[in-house]
Amino acid sequence: MSSSSDLVSTRPLLDKLGVRADSRVTLAGAFDDDFRSLLSSRTSAVSEGNTGVSVDLVFFSADSIDELSALVRLKSRIVSNGAIWVVSRKGKQATIRDTDVIAAALDAGLVDNKVVSFSVTHTALRLVIRLRDRR
């Protein structure tokens, strides 16, 4: 008998990532055209770079510990109950570990609260502003 933690989720990726039709999303870093198309099929409010508008979700592609310093800047881009998804390689191809992301998140005043298998090759860790620090 397998435990519930052994089950593979069949929910669509965007559902697991919390992307709704009214979500305002920004991309930071490199994402493939398939993910961009998937996002655009769910919400029309997808941007790249700093538009000066607060967003619900930031998808941040990170491959090095140095890149994680951007979390401080990205935190200022999200609404108080928003999230930053740090997308990185998993398995033997990983260039950063989840513990690296968690440590950088804490330094930026963020906490992790969910992990999702983003693709066969990538994982995503959701970072949010601590409840006590939300405005």
Image (cartoon, helix red, strand yellow):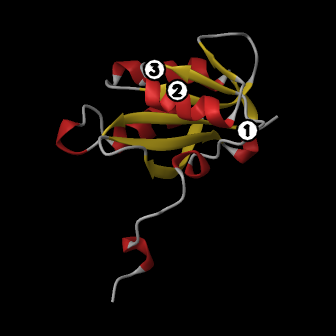
Residue type pointed to by label 2: Arg
Residue 103: percent from left, percent from top: 42, 37
Residue that lies at the very extreme toward the left in this rendered image? 92
Image label count:
3
- Mark 2 burial class by Cα count in 10 Å: few <14, some 14-19, many 20+: few
Residue at which label 3 appears: 69
For the N terminus, the image quarter is: bottom left
Residue type pointed to by label 1: Asp
Q: Earlier in the sequence, mark 3 or mark 1?
A: 3
Q: Earlier in the sequence, mark 3 or mark 2?
A: 2
For the C terminus, the image quarter is: top right
User: Which of 88/99 is in front?
Assistant: 88
State the separation of the CA atoms marked 1 and 2: 31 Å
Q: Relative to 25, is 86 on the left or the right? A: left
Q: Is residue 108 visible?
A: no
> Which residue corresponds to the image point at 45% horizontal and 18% vertical from the top-left?
29
- Mark 3 burial class by Cα count in 10 Å: few <14, some 14-19, many 20+: some
Q: Relative to 100, is 102 on the left or the right? A: right
State the separation of the CA atoms marked 3 and 1: 20 Å
Residue at which label 2 appears: 36
Q: Quadrant of residue 8?
A: bottom left
Residue at which label 1 appears: 133
State the separation of the CA atoms marked 3 and 2: 24 Å
Residue type pointed to by label 3: Ser
